[in-house]
Image (tube, rainbow, N blue to C red):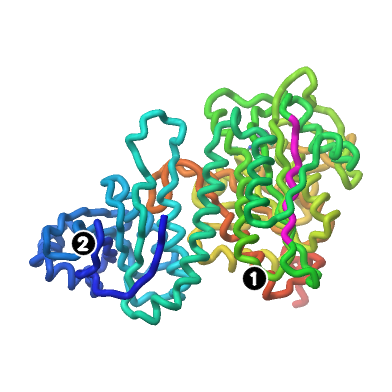
């Protein structure tokens, strides 16, 4: 898809379709007024009848006859003006592209609703991402090619002033990189496990690495043995597919002392292992590598945007299968840092692969860590499909992450890691167990992971509820969301600009310092 920005009067723009936004407060934007006049007041008429209201997600398609430069008008509801956010533009552009594509309209002009109450660059970046994400094909395995989500070949964003148009080409470039990366992530997560094996995931990472100049190396089963990754190997034990630890290294600043380590869960299928999952919805477990895919997509985008920082991406990829060779409940294994783990439940496998991934990231020099995983059903119970569960050991780093996520409209909510929770993971036989009772399931997993970060500033993202959507909505369709990929990229950029301490300040983070009242 070709995406450009230019200044111009909406009513004379030549295109197959002209998209206009409308808030639900009844106050028309300038472009609306111009188009309404050209069409002889038809928009006002629709508004009077209550047909056109500007609610979020509302769409109308009108033929323009010969009265406009464009053949069709696509009106998209923007919802409340008070909640106008860069992401509103991603939804708007995405909705317009999907509407045009469904009608085979190849050339789309999208009027940016000015004035913007936020930075125009963030706005145009999001609009570009939304337009690109709207071209994602969620059913590439269908034989009948009756739907063409990529039917729109050109999108032109229309702004009021020529100098604004000129200054926004960087934002469009950035949005293109991130939008393309998001679609690569979604395509990988959507792929079924018979195609998306650990070997295939590693090949995809290697191809992207070659294309964008990131060094990619793969640790095979024998390398993992040599490194003492007993926790990862315990998960891989039951599978005939060879496990892979995918290592992607971006060196954006050889002089910098900061290395951001991104560690993703890459379970290409999670049956639960010997602690087998029930059949209902088990197919969804093809997406249990969404965290790993987000890391691969983020590394590809980082390599193109080139922030002055070093980043290492690690994806721990394996199937979790039952078999005669599989790990059994009660088995005790040792992770790379020497800590012993009693595996109570083989379905709590994500934390096991991440444990060795976090150790390996530190071995490669990571001074700051973020892990991302479809880790616990408990995160879905607690926060639903709306927000990603965030747990961390360092206020400064997690606040930087929140700042990085802010432009994208994704929701993140923190859960605590108070020291009292350490009780949960105690084992009668080993240093810790991998699963416990019904209490605090997401926090349990994070307390477990914390044993492997050993004081390095760290943020843990549990995307079990947010990596997939069941609703069609703006730039998203039913399927993978690529959640957290863009925030991870932006975190790398912010961390390049702003130093964060390299030793986690846990007491401050868990607000434990004023523990003793003095009055
Ligand atoms: N991959 C699952 C978590 C999951 C569940 C992701 C639903 C997306 C949707 C994870 O490996 C898992 O099985 N977790 C168990 C942990 C339990 C055995 C302690 C869970 O959440 O039930
Ligand atoms: Mn599991
Ligand atoms: Zn899993």
* Relative vertical location of residue 218 with respect to residue 41 in this rendering, above or below: above
- Seen from the viewer's position, the closer of residues 181 and 3 is 3
| Identity of the residue drawn at 43% across and 49% down | 476
Residue at 80% in and 46% down:
423
Left or right: 56, with 236 as reference point:
left
Q: Quadrant of residue 191?
A: top right
| Disc 1 crowd, CA 10 A, few/some/many (<14, 14-19, 20+) | some
Q: Main secondary structure of the magenta part?
A: strand
Under circle 1, the secondary element is helix
Q: Residue at x 58, y 38 (%)?
A: 287
Q: Quadrant of ligand 1?
A: top right
- In this view of the protein, can residue 516 be seen by the observer? no
Say the numbered circle drawn on residue 70.
Answer: 2
| Drawn side of residue 185 relative to residue 115, left or right | right
The verdict on label 2 being within 8 Å of ligand 1 is no
**Residue displayed at 89% across by 34% down:** 429
For residue 23, above or below residue 262? below
Q: Tell me the quadrant of the picture where the C terminus can be found.
A: bottom right
Chain part drawn in magenta:
242-250
Residue 476, above or below 10: above
Magenta stretch containing residue 248, yes or no? yes
Q: Earlier in the sequence, mark 1 or mark 2?
A: 2
Residue 4 pos. (x, y %): 39, 66
Left or right position of 393 against 42: right
* Badge 1 vs badge 2, beta-carbon distance below 8 Å: no
Q: Measure the C-alpha gap from mark 1 to mark 2.
A: 41 Å
The residue beneath circle 1 is 494
Q: Is residue 255 visible?
A: yes
């Amino acid at each position: 898809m070709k995406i450009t920005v230019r200044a111009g009067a909406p009513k004379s723009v030549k295109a197959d379709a002209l998209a206009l936004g409308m808030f639900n407060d009844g106050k028309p934007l300038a472009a609306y007024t111009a188009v309404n006049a050209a069409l002889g007041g038809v928009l006002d008429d629709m508004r009077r009848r209550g047909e056109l209201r500007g609610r979020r997600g509302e769409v109308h398609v009108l033929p323009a006859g010969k009265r406009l430069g464009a053949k069709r008008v696509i009106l998209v509801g923007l919802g409340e003006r008070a909640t106008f956010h860069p992401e509103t533009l991603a939804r708007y552009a995405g909705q317009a592209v999907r509407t045009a594509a469904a009608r085979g309209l190849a050339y789309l002009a999208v009027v940016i609703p000015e004035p913007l109450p936020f930075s125009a660059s963030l706005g145009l970046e999001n609009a570009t991402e939304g337009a690109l994400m709207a071209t994602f094909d969620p059913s590439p395995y269908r034989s009948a090619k009756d739907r063409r989500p990529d039917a729109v070949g050109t999108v032109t964003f229309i702004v009021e002033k020529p100098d604004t148009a000129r200054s926004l080409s960087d934002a469009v470039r950035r949005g293109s990189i991130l939008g393309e990366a998001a679609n690569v992530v979604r395509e990988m997560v959507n792929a079924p496990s018979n195609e998306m094996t650990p070997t295939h995931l590693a090949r995809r990472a290697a191809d992207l690495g070659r294309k964008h100049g990131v060094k990619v190396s793969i640790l095979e089963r024998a390398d993992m043995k040599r490194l003492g990754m007993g926790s990862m190997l315990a998960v891989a034990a039951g599978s005939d597919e060879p496990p892979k630890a995918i290592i992607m290294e971006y060196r954006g600043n050889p002089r910098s002392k900061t290395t951001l380590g991104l560690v993703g869960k890459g379970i290409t299928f999670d049956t639960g292992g010997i602690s087998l999952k029930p059949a209902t919805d088990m197919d969804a477990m093809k997406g249990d590598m969404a965290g790993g895919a987000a890391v691969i997509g983020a590394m590809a985008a980082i390599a193109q945007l080139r922030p002055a920082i070093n980043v290492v991406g690690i994806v721990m990829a394996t199937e979790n299968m039952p078999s005669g060779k599989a790990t059994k409940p009660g088995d005790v294994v040792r992770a790379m840092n020497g800590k012993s783990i009693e595996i109570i439940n083989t379905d709590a496998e994500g934390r096991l692969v991440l444990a060795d991934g976090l150790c390996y990231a530190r071995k490669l020099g990571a001074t700051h860590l973020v892990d991302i995983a479809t880790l616990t059903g408990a995160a879905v119970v607690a926060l639903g499909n709306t927000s990603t569960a965030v747990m961390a050991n360092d206020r400064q780093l997690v606040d930087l992450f929140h700042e990085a996520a802010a432009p994208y409209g994704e929701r993140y909510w923190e859960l605590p890691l108070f020291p009292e929770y350490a009780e949960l993971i105690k084992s009668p036989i080993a240093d810790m167990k991998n699963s416990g009772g019904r209490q605090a399931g997401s926090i349990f997993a994070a307390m477990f992971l914390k044993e492997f970060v050993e004081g390095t500033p760290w943020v843990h993202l549990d995307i079990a509820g947010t990596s997939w959507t069941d609703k069609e909505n703006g730039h998203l369709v039913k399927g993978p969301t690529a959640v957290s990929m863009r925030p991870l990229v932006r975190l790398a950029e912010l961390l390049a600009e702003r130093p964060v301490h390299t030793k986690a300040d846990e007491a401050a983070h868990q607000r434990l310092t004023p523990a003793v009242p003095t009055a």
